[in-house]
Amino acid sequence: MYRMTFGMMLAAAAGLGRWGVPITDLPQGQGPAVEDSAPRSDVPPAPWLQGDPADSLYRAARESLNRRDFRRAADLFAQLPTKFPNSGYTPDAFYWQAFALYRLGGESDLKRGLQVLQAQFERYPKASTKGDAKALEARINGELARMGDEQATADIQKTAADAAMGGDMPDHEMPDHDMPDHDMSDRCDDDSDDMKLAALNALIHMDAERARPILQKVLARRDAGSACLRQKAVFLVAQGGGDGVERVLVETARTDPDPEVREQAVFWLSQVEGDAAVAALDSILRSSKDAPVQEKALFALSQHDSPKAR
């Protein structure tokens, strides 16, 4: 039903930012490297506090994480608050410790990661990584839910359901259907969105049938702040597959007020296998009055595997 090469999976994960593809969905030994090209919350920043007493320890912890030695990285980041409670590196050390524990992936490590994040929320509510920490909390809960943890499952379901909530924009505030808005990257730095997207991503891997109607409600939102959320929901709809995915993507490509969301819908529709997807793309090509969307539909048809796309 749905085709995605490993390279495209990584591209999608990078494009979807901090909540990406779950670690358990990546081929063994091919997880995203922790390097400077990775999403910003997956790479500790280079040391920036010369003269700080914790500088050497932070460098060692960062180096361990970049080498994918997650156990040592978790241990070293854990030492920062204990040995250097007044260091400028300490507030964010909780996040990096929890991230290393998340990458280890064991149930006890994941639960410990949640405890570490809770400590950061309580002790350093203004830490620069506070938004990333909320998204990481949802990612960890997603992994625990996949292991059968009932509390984590309930948390994921609640956060995912919250993503569907939002008021409609008044008609006079709706974006012009033919006018490009600000670049999507300028609008997609919402910590709350990161948390909701991580939860939706986890839910669709746990229970696609439960996730699908929630994602459709996300795509039905028309409030000003949901464009980025809708763009990323398009990917999740396509990734989840199932009956009616073509209909949902076509409806989004035709009616969403944001041009980038419409174009993303066409792109991901091109990744859905089968004649129904070809028919959907053909209908967009023939009936859409949106020239950029038509161009993407034409290109998508030219790349589709189905003989009917020729």
Image (cartoon, grey):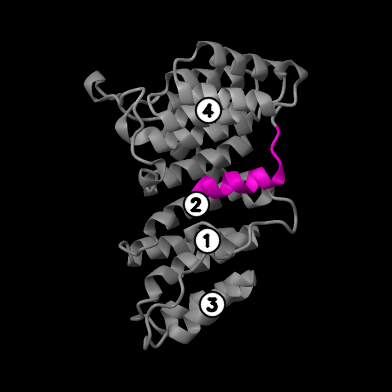
**Contact between labelled residues 3 and 2, with CB atoms less than 8 Å apart:** no
Distance (Cα) linking label 4 and label 3 = 41 Å
Query: Which quarter of the rendered picture does the C terminus lie within?
Result: top right
Label 1 secondary element: helix
Asked whether residue 90 is in view, the answer is yes
Residue 16 colored magenta? yes
Name the residue nearer the viewer: 214 or 252.
252
Q: Nearer the viewer, residue 278 or 294?
A: 294
Q: Are circles 1 and 2 on residues that touch, CB within 8 Å?
A: yes
- Residue holding disc 3: 61
Q: Which residues are magenta?
A: 3-19
Q: Earlier in the sequence, mark 2 or mark 4?
A: 2
- Residue 207's image quarter? top right
Q: Report which residue position mark 4 lands on.
A: 265
Instruction: Pick whichever of labels 1 and 3 is earlier in the sequence.
Output: 1
Q: Which residue carries the number 1 mark?
A: 42
Residue at x 48%, y 59% (from the top left corner)? 41
Q: Secondary structure at mark 4?
A: helix
**Pointer 2 residue:** 18
Q: Tag count in the figure?
A: 4
Residue in the picture at 62% in, 38% down: 206
Q: Amino acid type of disc 2?
A: Arg
At label 3, the amino acid type is: Ala
